[in-house]
Amino acid sequence: MTSSPVLDPTRLAKLREALLAASYTADGCLDLLGPTGYAALARSEVVPALRKTRGGTPLETLVRLFLLQRPVPYAAAEAALPVQDCLADGWLVRDGDEVRATVDVRPYANEVAGMPSADAWVVSDLGCAVGGAGGIGSGGSAAGIARKDLVLGVGGASTTLANLAVRRPVREALDLGSGSGVQALHAARHAQHVTATDLNPRALHFTRLTLGLSGFENTEVAEGSLFEPVGDRRFDLIVSNPPFVISPGSRFVYRDGGMAGDELCRSLVRRAAAHLEPGGYCHLLANWQHVKGEDWHDRLAGWVAGTGLDAWVVQREVQDTAQYAELWLRDGGDHRSSGAEYQARYDEWLDAFESGGVEGIGFGWITLRAGGAETPTVRIEEWPHPVEQPLGPHIESWFARQDFLRSSDDAGLLAARYVLADEVVQEQVGAPGAEDPEHVILRHNRGMRRATKVDTVGAGFVGVCDGTLSAGEIVDAIAQLLGEERVVLRDRVPESLRMLTEQGFIEPVFGELAED
């Protein structure tokens, strides 16, 4: 394994203290660089940040050294860091009167829903933090490290997954395919114990560095593929940003699954049930094939069928095979090769898709839960629209509502009481000056940010459901107001109640309030 910084807990603590003293944190860097400079880094543009770090303060020195990967004067580094320890442990190397970093160290706001933000740092290979994978292969990666073994820092995928996870206190959590340890970092704040696994031993070392530098000790790492390193152990939370790219080979450990088509993601879903404690959640990002003659909904339903798990699958984007190949050819740096080489690789991707009848690739997320129901709830949908982040609390609420709906017949739905969810607004659509709107739309500004059309009864219902009356009592009042038959309306309304509850516009009242 190519050398990387030594894991020395005592000296890691000294380094952490130095980073905090210099305000080398997510908030400190944002204050220094400003929104413009900080946003430019996400686009792999460093000039605005370089202009903001010419003063030589400890914070400016650390930003140049660890975030922008620029050499700095030895004297400046000495003023900001325990520089001799950093040289001895391999965080820095010296070139004459200057020192340079051997790794990316990115400040990270370790946020968990319901808990105050905490300062943390993600350690990854050079060129793999600023701009994520886009920085690889452009000359910025660490010398002597095979590109296939590189360890990425924080990217869009890892941030998405972190925002999806249900963040309640748990006993055991698993970060499967940990990379630089971003998911383990989040889980360590609300889990008693975290296990991080990866096929790449370099990734596990970087996970240790990330967790150690950020001050977490409730973790362990295990090397191996998928669930193999954990045997038959079960967990309350499993998170995985796996190598989900559907590629005609396995060139890069961090992205290519090494299995045919989308088999790796399917395998994760199929095997998760054996590793979830009752009530436990599994969150993973995935790609899946759209195969000619096969509905993609049915394909994903087949992944879940027979597992006994509740599932919510959301497709966020679909690319045709050419778009998909181009995306990952650029990620692999193939666009910088000769025209003939690039064309040959491009042909290789398209040949593989054509042979499998693949017409497109779906991108999305999968949430599984060991709900224990005899008939699990499985929802598979396409939702390319903006959502609220973090989404984890809304995902947990969605599964709780599924439990209620699954256990409630029409009579039960009418007997229950409901409250209007926060930040639901009503819009009326119709011709200007018309006495009555053509239709009424409910729009939810939280969670999935859904919108749905309702009739007069639905609009009237949500306008008064504050938890004091049962749904049946409200429906009876509406029937009297509209001059409709009470029994007829009671027969019609449960279908709407199910839809409004499932989509989160109304929430059933549980617990003490329901017993008042």
Image (tube, grey):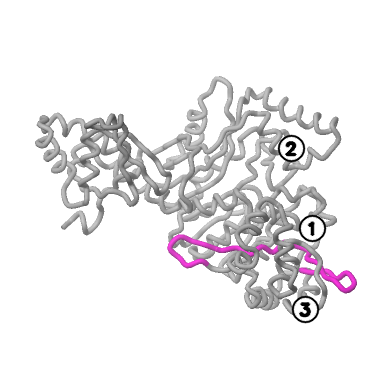
Name the amino acid, label 3.
Answer: Glu
The quarter of the picture where residue 512 lies is bottom left
The secondary structure type at the circle numbered 1 is loop
Residue 120 position (above or below residue 149): below
Q: Which residue is mark 1?
A: 1
Residue 214 position (above or below residue 421): below
**What span is in magenta?**
91-117
Image location (x, y in percent) of residue 132: 68, 51
Q: Quadrant of the C terminus?
A: bottom left
Image location (x, y in percent) of residue 501: 31, 42
Image location (x, y in percent) of residue 333: 78, 42
Name the amino acid, label 1.
Answer: Met
Q: Which mark is residue 78?
A: 3
Q: Main secondary structure of the magenta part?
A: strand
Disc 1 versus disc 3: nearer the observer: 3
Q: Determine if the magenta segment contains residue 348.
A: no
Instruction: Give me the C-alpha separation between circle 1 and circle 3.
Output: 29 Å
Q: Is residue 287 left or right of residue 11?
A: left
Q: Is residue 347 left or right of residue 299?
A: right
